[in-house]
């Protein structure tokens, strides 16, 4: 029997052992959450809380009969994260963006959010359901990446300087069809290649990963209404 399996059994019977086990395997948990979601995860992400809880659950429910503990923990992690994304997806398909966006209004707290402002304005111009249908379609496309259209409101770059940097990354990405296809296949932003070819700091790419992926998908896809949000990029 592997030492890790025996340790999991001990941890399932002792709170102190459990806490030590969880602390020792934080890096492992982050690594496998990132592997499952296909994107870089930090402790500030919701997925971390879900994954940490799932790993703890795996410890407390483990027995030798279930085979390798690490293999068992991965199964539990995948199951709990899948449940999390499924519930998120169900909610987001009903309300892909906040109700105020579809009403064509932006309140005081949100008026600096360029995405919300642009979409609210565009919704007023589009009396039919074209924009709503595009949002539903793009939300489906974003699901495998681990985020939703609504997430873009909080992760869009606010300052023009940061926008310009993100646009450089987007421009490079869509100018390289092979790289773009690789992103779509693996569902991850090719950070290393973008950094080496653009000299953009990796931290900026990581912080605005969702925005860059979303912009690339919108610009290269069939989303005429949503593309209006990226008008400034197209005009460069």
Image: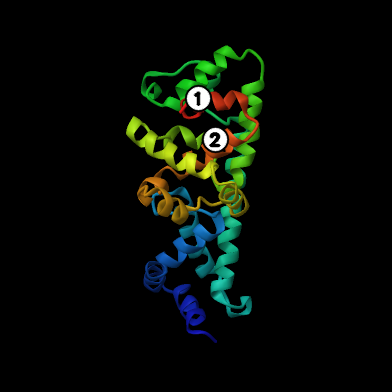
Q: Residue at x 57, y 76 (%)?
A: 63
Q: CA distance from mark 1 to mark 2?
A: 18 Å
Identify the residue under disc 1: 231
Percent x, y of residue 215: 52, 36
Vertical order, 2 against 195 (above or below): below
Q: Residue at x 44, y 18 (%)?
A: 106
Q: Residues within 10 Å of mark 1 (few under 14, many from 20)?
A: few
Identify the residue under disc 2: 149
Image side of residue 72 versus residue 152, left or right: right
Vertical order, 67 against 22 (above or below): below
Please tell me the numbered disc located at residue 1. Answer: none
Q: Residues within 10 Å of mark 2 (few under 14, many from 20)?
A: many
Percent x, y of residue 103: 54, 16
Residue at the bottom extreme of this rendering? 1
Q: Quadrant of the C terminus?
A: top left
Q: Residue at x 66, y 20 (%)?
A: 129
The quadrant in which residue 221 appears is top right
């Amino acid at each position: 029997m592997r030492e890790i399996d025996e340790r999991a059994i001990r941890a399932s019977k002792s709170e102190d052992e459990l806490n030590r086990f969880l602390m020792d395997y934080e890096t492992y948990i982050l690594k496998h959450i990132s592997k499952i979601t296909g994107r870089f995860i930090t402790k500030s992400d919701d997925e971390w809380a879900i994954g940490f809880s799932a790993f703890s659950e795996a410890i407390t429910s483990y027995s030798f009969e279930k085979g390798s503990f690490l293999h068992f923990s991965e199964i539990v992690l995948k199951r709990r994260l899948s449940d999390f994304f499924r519930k998120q997806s169900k909610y987001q398909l009903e309300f892909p963006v906040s109700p105020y966006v579809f009403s064509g209004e932006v309140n005081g707290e949100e008026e600096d959010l360029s995405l919300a402002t642009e979409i609210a304005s565009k919704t007023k111009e589009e009396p039919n359901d074209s924009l709503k249908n595009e949002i539903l379609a793009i939300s489906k496309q974003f699901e495998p990446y681990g985020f939703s259209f609504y997430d873009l409101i909080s992760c869009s770059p606010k300052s023009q300087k940061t926008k310009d940097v993100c646009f450089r990354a987007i421009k490079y990405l869509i100018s390289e069809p092979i790289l773009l296809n690789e992103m779509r296949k693996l569902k991850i932003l090719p950070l290393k290649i973008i950094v080496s070819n653009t000299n953009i700091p990796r931290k900026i790419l990581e912080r605005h990963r969702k925005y860059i992926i979303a912009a690339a998908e919108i610009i290269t896809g069939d989303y005429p209404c949503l593309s209006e949000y990226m008008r400034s990029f197209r005009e460069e």
